Image: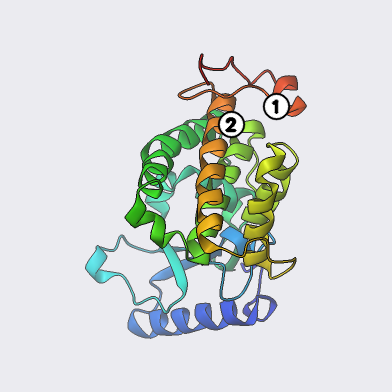
Amino acid sequence: MSLLRPRDLPSDVAASISRFLTSADDEEPGLVEAVWVEGSIVLGDYHPDVSDMDVVVMTKRPLAPRERLRVPAPLSVTWTTRGTLSALPPITAATLHRAGVAVRGPIPRALVPDVPRATLVAYVADNLATYWQPWLARARRPLFRLTCLHPRRVQWGVFGVPRQYVTALDGSIVSKTAAARRVRDLFDARHHRILDEALRLRTGAGARQYRSPFARAAAMVAFLEHAIERTHAVLGVGVRAPARSPGEVRQGLVTAATPGR
């Protein structure tokens, strides 16, 4: 059953999926049982030449890495089978259940259950500790900071943690743009400028906020540090920041600030 036909997709996404399926069916007919679209495309935040084309491909049998079919760029594939659906990353599984669409095969929610909020929160906490805090530490170093001059690196540093924050706050899965706009109303006003710049880089709308790419990179690092602290405050672990938003206080999710912070 197909929920979304290729001609209903953005043209570049449709072309990439079509090329992939044609190649896959020629190489091993019947191997691909389902192709599910997830990520920014189904969250209403797809921007050509900026966004990833995220799909989950379910095959009839497990594939060793060397057996996996060629994936045309810029398609980004998560491989699974019916027997390994439970191993999908929690954010991917939640997105599929809540918003995923099928180009081929059964609808995602028929096979992929929703993810409990507690599981999503645990995933966010682990991702902050194992990915974003080390990434921030590298971004503070002079050599790595030079790579943060690139617009894509600015977007990566600004958009990643706000999505985690929103998920920790209320269990929802939102796009990069939606998360940035939401935290703009919740986080300190001194970070509005870098949020507006990242949104401009992603959507193409709005005025340029920085003349100096070095100042922009520094603002991105400062924002990332603040976003991690605010997300830890919601989670109640690690570095803790003072409550600043009524939404956090109403939900009883904010802990006291660490002394000296």
Q: Is 104 positioned to the left or the right of 4 in the image?
A: left
Pointer 2: what residue? Answer: 230
> Image point 56% across, 76% down: which residue?
49
Rendered position, 166 above or below 256: below
* Element marked by disc 2: helix
Place of residue 76 in the rendered image (x, y in percent of width and height, measured from the top left) = 45, 67
Q: CA distance from mark 1 to mark 2?
A: 9 Å
Q: Is 70 positioned to the left or the right of 230 in the image?
A: left
Q: Nearer the viewer, residue 71 or 136?
A: 136
Q: Is residue 253 visible?
A: yes
Q: Quadrant of residue 134?
A: top left
Rendered position, 246 above or below 27: above
Pointer 1: what residue? Answer: 244
Q: Is 183 positioned to the left or the right of 258 in the image?
A: right
Q: Quadrant of residue 245?
A: top right
- Are the residues tagged 1 and 2 within 8 Å (C-beta)? yes
Say whether disc 1 or disc 2 marks the residue closer to the N-terminus: 2
Mark 2 residue type: Arg
Q: Is residue 54 visible?
A: no
Q: Quadrant of residue 168?
A: top right
Place of residue 233 in the rendered image (x, y in percent of width and height, measured from the top left) = 57, 25
> Image point 24% across, 63% down: which residue?
64
Mark 1 residue type: Arg
* Element marked by disc 1: loop
Place of residue 13 in the rendered image (x, y in percent of width and height, measured from the top left) = 57, 76
Q: Residues within 10 Å of mark 2 (few under 14, many from 20)?
A: many
> Image point 69% across, 56% down: which residue?
196
Rendered position, 15 above or below 78: below
Place of residue 169 in the rendered image (x, y in percent of width and height, measured from the top left) = 64, 32
> Image point 36% across, 39% down: which residue?
130
Disc assigned to residue 162: none
